[in-house]
Image: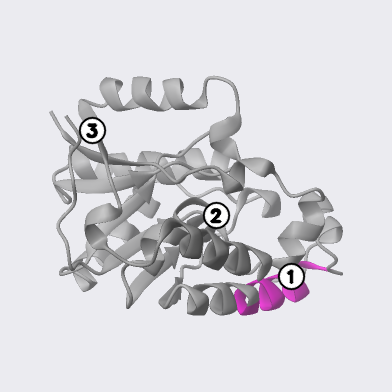
Amino acid sequence: MERKPTTGARLIVISPHLDDAVLGCAGLLAACPGSIVCTVFAGEPASPMHTEWDEASGFADSHEALQARRLEDRRALALCRAEPLWLDFLDAQYGSTPAVEAVSDTLAAQFARFDTYLPVCPFGFWHPDHELVGAACRLLLRTRRVFRYIAYEDAIHRAMPGALRAGFEQLEADGLSASATSARPFGGASARRLAALKGRAVRAYSSQMRAFAPFPSDVARAERYWLVEAL
């Protein structure tokens, strides 16, 4: 049976990178004005670095990339009537991967800070940074620092063969369960208007659209959500 979230909530949405929350759950964000998007890997290396992804995105180095991508994030989230919160962890392309426990502890502090907001986390599919964030969120449930959260499917990465099955297997291994839920109880605009809004928000990440070229069609697929909790 479908499980439904409580109406009238504001959200704190965990996003691995500066675009993932919009790619995966822009419709849900738009239905909950005043929500927070907490991006984990939004930190800047101490010295400018040169990576293939930043170059493909049109940037000279990591400093230029982070400055522009944060501006893109602010613009995209404004369309969803949400506010950004950027953490200082460095993503994998900069060669510094934090421990799962460090990310989990930091997320716990943010959830405590916004304790009246409903937590929303990525499943954590395929990409190492996404898998790490997913593991950090599951650790919060296993240690009872969070009792439940809504999981969104990581757009683009969910299209990888076996990604969703692997996600459910990992939940079971961690002693957690997932029940299908819906964004409809939050209300908001029609599906057509939400799709148009999401399109505008996604296009705000112009550097990432340039790097993917063509942009993956999976982003236009329906958003799906799951209520995750301990067994």
| Amino acid at pointer 2 | Leu
* Mark found first going from the N terminus, 1 or 2: 2
Q: Position of residue 79 (x, y in %)?
A: 51, 76
Observer-nearest of 38 and 50: 38
Q: Could you tell me if residue 127 is visible in this image?
A: no
Left or right position of 172 against 26: left
| Amino acid at pointer 1 | Ala
SS for dot 2? helix
Please determine whether, in this image, residue 43 is positioned above or below residue 230.
below
Q: Position of residue 111 (x, y in %)?
A: 24, 63
> In which quadrant will I find the C terminus?
top left
* Mark found first going from the N terminus, 2 or 3: 2
Q: Are marks 1 and 3 in contact (CB under 8 Å)?
A: no
Of badges 1 and 2, the one in the foreground is 2
The residue carrying mark 2 is: 23
Residues in magenta? 61-71
Q: Position of residue 209 (x, y in %)?
A: 75, 58
At x 26%, y 26%, the residue is 174
Label number found at residue 179: 3
Q: CA distance from mark 2 to mark 3?
A: 22 Å
Left or right position of 92 against 6: right
Please determine whether, in this image, residue 139 is positioned above or below residue 183.
above
Q: CA distance from mark 1 to mark 2?
A: 19 Å
10 Å neighbourhood of mark 1: few (<14), some, or many (≥20)? many
Left or right position of 158 against 186: right
